[in-house]
Image (cartoon, rainbow, N blue to C red):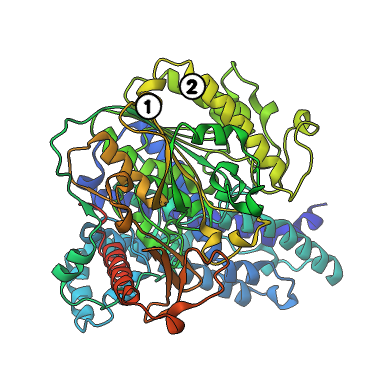
Amino acid sequence: MMKRLGLLSPLAATLCNLLIAYGAYFLARVIYFCENYSFFSQGLSFSYIMEMMRGALVFDTSAILVTNIPYFVLMLFPLHFKETISYQKLCRFIFLLINGLALAINLCDAVYFRFTMRRTTTTVFSEFSNEGNLGGIFMTETLRHFYLVILFVFIVWAMYRLYRLSPLASHHSPLKWWHYDLATLLSLAAFAPFVVAGIRGGFTTAVRPITISNANQYVNRPIDAALVLNTPFSLYRTIGKAVFVVPDYFRDAAEMDAIYSPVHVPNDSVPMMKKNVVVLIVESFGREYIGALNRTLDNSRYQGYTPHVDSLIAKSITFSHSYCNGRKSIDGMPSILSSIPMFVEPFFLTPASMNHVSGIASLLAGEGYQTAFFHGAQRGSMGFQAFARSTGFQAYYGREDYDTDSRFGGDDDFDGMWAIWDEPFLQYYATKMSEMKQPFMTAVFTASSHHPYVIPEKYKDVYPEEGIIIHKCIRYTDMALGRFFQTASRQPWFKNTIFVLTSDHTNLSDHQEYQTDLGGFCSPIIIYEPGVTDSQPEVQQKIAQQIDILPTVMGRLHYPKPYFGFGIDVLNTPAEDTWAVNYLNGIYQYVKHGHVIQFDGQKTKAVYALTDSLMQHNLLTSHPSPLTSEMEREVKAIIQQYMSRMTQDRLQP
């Protein structure tokens, strides 16, 4: 029996040595903390430290498993010549080389942190690519921090002493080689899924591969995310992610600012109105599905799939042209809540996600608002909790919180794939807001109108299959929104609230008008204020986009301080000055003056009239217009502002 167990000893030795790597990462984090104690000492408590350590374990696991893949292959792949002392010593050398290098990188970054206040990413290589004195700087800092060199040598020595050689290296198995091969292959097969899950950050379908922005899920302050992360993870997760390259369209910053600036400086003297703000981000709820916004579709016969939202629009302000700023859920969050569009790559997935970012929640929290974000999926799903926390939401309510509230159905209301069904979760949302102190700012992200496009069993006869597969889900979510507003209308806070309803992005389409380059970005933006008498419900003949939501809400509240946002206050901007921008496969689309230009970063490739809903007639050559050069100049200013501010961490006024 012992001899058979001996077949598994390479796996056992590998797992034991992995614990040594975890210990090295832990010690590196302790040193990182001590070296920069003054930055991290604020607001520390035992529970907070434990929360950060819980997050650190996730990121350390990912980094350790990625970097040690060569070691795993050497240890676990069935090779007969592994059964020698010299081979096992080679494995030990590879292990120490990999994890010693990771330790050195972490310790070096402990010194560099105070200059950047975040973990180093691959942008550091481009940042210092033209510097010729790096060797001297490195030697100077090495001498200045000699104690880190001593600690490095000691930890590597301890790793060497604690390392376990495989017993098979000195005790050949008497069993047949095919037994050995089979057992080793089974060990490798059993180990592989755990490696994949560890690298991704979890097993579930709701977890995408974690990125550096997910560290915000575990911290109260953005700066503390550096303690949760480790530098090897930050480096390898940003390889190939140097997406923000600053163009040189404008050499004069003043000229660029005169054309476009994302810094908003209020100029009215009206006292701030501290009304509640409620933002509903509805999954995949594209403009196409809404009958009230498509009166001319299908030769004016189109009814849509949203009778409850249609009735809401009859009491609201919306816009003749409205767009999302990305095509994914992770694009929608920054666009809607922080006025940051998606250019080139999702903001979540870039090193810039660790910049100092503001948002509706943080701005209003500074004015005494209570803030909370709601999403019916498990905590950590899609990185929403991390982003919400980093942008000022004081509380986060997810599936786990819903499950523990005895007033609701718990996990019986889970859709089996993503989240709690929209109908019960929106009721939970309304109930929780009634428990909050006014004024409050909240946002909810729904989930049911999403792949795999199913609805609760009890509604399958109510909302049967029709049109395309998403339509029944849209009807279900529309009903859930209707019930939400019915419940909200009975609450004492209802008439003191600004409601904004939009979608994260668009989805399946059965109309060509919504399948074009621009049509695929058509999302509703609906502003509903049940307690106002100074504005009439209407569809304004303006262009609006998700990044306009933050400035528009700030304008509506008469927020008195300067703030940052790439969009505009669309309600207080003349129609001819409203615009929208988005990015699609290397092309920037800029909408203004009844046209859209497609700009590839160097030149305009096409111009279409918005009345050309199928985008069939490129006007660039057939009908050249001075508006084209004006629009190109404006989109260049937007791009350069975006890229320069992202790379320089200037997302503040």
* Depth check, front residue: 161 or 546: 546
Q: Name the residue under label 1.
A: 497
Please give left or right for residue 313 compared with residue 119 in the image: right
**Marks 1 and 2, how far apart at CA:** 10 Å
Label 2 is placed on what type of residue?
Answer: Ala
Label 1 is placed on what type of residue?
Answer: Thr
Whether pointer 1 and pointer 2 mark residues with C-beta atoms closer than 8 Å, the reply is yes
Residue 336 lies, in percent from the top left, at 41, 47
| Vertical relation: 504 (above or below) 77 | above
Could you say which quadrant of the image residue 126 lies in? bottom left
Q: Name the residue under label 2.
A: 488
Residue 599 lies, in percent from the top left, at 41, 75
Secondary structure category for the residue under label 2: helix
- Residue at the (26%, 44%) spot, across then down: 40
Residue 187 lies, in percent from the top left, at 74, 59
User: Does the image show residue 175?
Assistant: no
Residue 647 lies, in percent from the top left, at 29, 66
Q: Which of marks 1 and 2 is nearer the N terminus?
A: 2
- Residue at the (56%, 35%) spot, across then down: 309
